[in-house]
Amino acid sequence: MSQGRRTVNSPYGAPWCPRLTRMPGPSMFHPQRRARRGAALTLVFAGVLATGAAAGSWSPDGRGGQDGRKAPEARAASRTAARPADRAVAGDERPGDGAGTPVDRGEVEAAAARAVEDGKSGSEAAAEVVGRSGDRWSAVYSAREYEGLERALNGTYIGVGLSARRAAGGRTEVDSVRPGSPAGRAGLRPGDRLRSVDGTPVDGRPVTEVVARLRGDTAARPGAGTPVRIGVERAGRSWERTLYRARLATESVTVERLAGDGGAGAAAVRIKVGSFTRGTGEQVRAAAAQALPGEGILLDLRGNSGGLVDEAVTAASAFLDGGLVATYDVHGRQRALEARTGGATALPLVVLVDGGTMSAAELLAGALQDRGRAVVAGSRTFGKGSVQMPSRLADGSVAELTVGHYRTPAGRVVDGRGIAPDLVVRGDAEERARTVLSGLGGGS
């Protein structure tokens, strides 16, 4: 592995996002295309890249609900009324709050069917039923929204290549710009203020809504090549520019070799996992396999809002020699998720987490902690450990409803509680983690 940072390419293309696959168990985000019940279980740990988590209810240091919330364009996606974006990122909600009352799937499906028969919106009717339950992890997506989420699972999205954050006074600012993207070619920079999108002022609006407009989720005909006009302000100068959306690939795993500093800082391979999309688990395995003798591993799950559960299990297999990763229940029936054998069990390992670590990422951190395989450092994770099952409604929209919860190998409940780190660290988390690696034998 060459010195410096690179992106690990997945055999499926650049991946990204949370949800569950067609495996006979759970997955992290949204279900594969399906109309039959039970075909794909979804552990929407992430609450999803598609919602406020990824959309910016917390910043990388784990502080949520304040100025500084971020919405990566590659992750954000609007939802139908069931859970408004501003509620999903509300700062006064404690992690795990809002479990509410389990939603009756039959009631949701019946409400949608009646609405369609009456010539009304089935998704809106279903969203009303879900909204009354108070379960913030159950949600209703329009067919178009759901299609976008599935695209994200495959590592692509339609957008202009920027992420936004909430700044002081309700303003929206550019947080980062992807090189070579429409936003990058237009000269946008981090710190630029976004004033409007297609003529609509964005001050005071939820960051998720702003990003959804940039992506075209609210447009009549979204897609690559469609225009979006944005108003920008920089250093007191304002202007407007028309960008043309493009199909962009996401990067879920980046790898960087960190040289030892001759002191407490151990030589290490830093594996940053942004989300668990198709192929992410194998990317983590490949990166871990390239660690040199004497190097430790920093597995950085900070800000990771989840993804496909089977990808998180594959990632766990990179560091375990088989055994239990998690258990989960569906309507009271217990099932187990197990790692493959042959992982690198001798490599010193520290896992970095924060308040933005969710769902499948919490499953992975909890497994490595309970199995005694890693030291977990940082701050308490978000606490998203519920299981959702998708169901296609009469108008083609999709309802994802909570059906159960998962536990760590030691039987700990994550939902509403999160994973408590072995070492609480703020600010200099990576530096402290490297010191811990030295004590574990890394970098020697």
Image: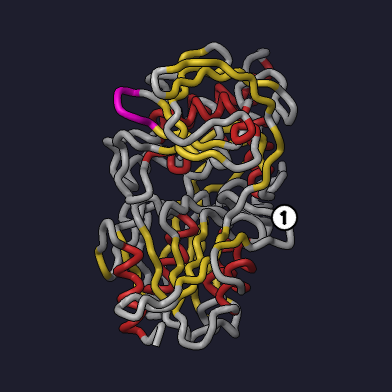
Residue 396 is one of the magenta-drawn residues? no
Residue 109's place in the image compared with 306, above or below, is: above
Whether residue 441 is visible? yes
Query: Which part of the image, by quadrant, shows the C terminus?
Result: bottom left
Residue at 38 percent across and 78 percent down: it is 266
Residue at 51 percent across and 80 percent down: it is 320
Residue 400's place in the image compared with 418, above or below, is: above
Which range is magenta? 166-170
Overall secondary structure of the magenta section: helix
Give 195 or 213, whichever is nearer the viewer. Answer: 195
* Residue 159 location (% of width, % of height): 63, 33
Q: Which quadrant holds residue 341?
A: bottom right
Give the side of residue 65 with respect to residue 150, left or right: left
Name the amino acid type tagged 1. Answer: Gly
Residue 167 is one of the magenta-drawn residues? yes
Q: Callout 1 environment at 10 Å: few (<14), some (14 to 19), or many (20+)?
A: some
Residue 143's place in the image compared with 375, above or below, is: above
* Residue 25 location (% of width, % of height): 60, 61
* Residue 363 location (% of width, % of height): 45, 63
Give the side of residue 153 with respect to residue 346, left or right: right
Q: Mark 1 highlights which residue?
A: 13
Residue at 40 percent across and 23 percent down: it is 235
Whether residue 159 is visible? no
